[in-house]
Amino acid sequence: MQAVMLDVTGEGSPDGSLGLAERFQEQFPHIAVLLVTDRPNELGLSALRAGVRDLVEPGLPIDEIRWVLLRAIEANSAATADGQKATPEASGRVITVASPKGGVGKTTLATNLAVGLAQESPNGTVLVDLDIQFGDVAAALDLDPEYTLADAVHGAGLRDVTGLKTLLTKHRTGLHVLCGVKSPVEGDEITAEHVNTILGLLISEFRYVVIDTAPGMGPHTLAALDHTTDLVLTASLDVPSVRGLRKEMELLDELELPPATRHVAVNMVDRGGGLSLADVEATIGRKVDFAIPRSSKVMASTNRGRPILEDRGRDKVSKDLEQLVSRFRPTTVRKSGLSWSSRHRGAAS
């Protein structure tokens, strides 16, 4: 399989390059066409219609260019004998951050995790706000998205990964973000099947897919778990949260989710609350993988919309968050994707 890259940077007209992309699509469909452009939002839909496989930003590191080329070639090679494109095989690492209750800093962990991974792979990392009605990933990253998850389920986002990528918001770190809906009413139309389709497309395109979920185990979270390679279970150091964590882990056992894929993170840890990490471990019957201390720096970073790992500090909370990110950085080792029969989902209803 082969690929060709067309340059449409600057203010010039893209018509010639898009026309050439169309001719490649018609005459040489086995060749993947990529478009180098500094106007991805403006040209995304036109490129999709012309048969462009992906958009590449100028100045992308060489390792990222190799990744984009590899994914484009692999996706193009999924053509069937009659010329119809098959769904490319999933290859991304999917990290879902979940918690039984709200207010435990789940979004803080998810945004820092995504920003940390984007420092290694800026064009290969996407963060999905799957707290359907009340997600605040956009606020945590100081983003004002033009498109949200609601647009993805009504437009080209469900049909083609290139169309879906035009709906992502680019963060200043290079991280791509599929932001949550602007109104809870918009969330009513988003189904678990929508989530399943969107995640399937993103996984085929990105090295890292980080998912911030709503509290509990609703249908959207269960749909995400079907794709999850790593599950970060989050709780704070208080009795209701820890008991909720134990119940959630018991439910995961009922759903036959392999324990090896789980990572337990206790957030907002301090010594004055009456509970210790040993108490948590005794309650849930396993070791805590990550303990993130309570810190005024976390609240300040949240209010500024600037995740702590964006600045790479040397304080303890920064180092502990960096340790969380480092758990998922190696890309040569990937756990098997998780899936179980839909009959198990009845246990969560």
Image (cartoon, rainbow, N blue to C red):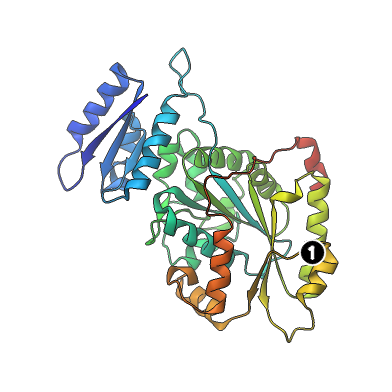
Left or right of 342, for residue 122: left
Q: Quadrant of residue 143?
A: bottom left
Residue shown at the point (82%, 73%) measured from the top left:
279
Residue at numbered disc 1: 244
Residue at left offset 56%, top offset 76%: 317
Q: Is residue 349 visible?
A: no
Element under disc 1: helix
**Where residue 297 sits: x, y (%)?**
52, 80
The crowd level at tag 1 (other Cα within 10 Å; few <14, some 14-19, many 20+) is some
Total number of numbered discs in the rendering: 1
Question: Would you say residue 170 is visible in this rendering?
Answer: yes
Q: Name the quadrant of the N terminus.
A: top left
Extreme top residue here?
82
250 lies left or right of 137: right
Which residue shows up at 80% across the image and 36% down it? 343
Position in image of residue 242 (x %, y %): 78, 68
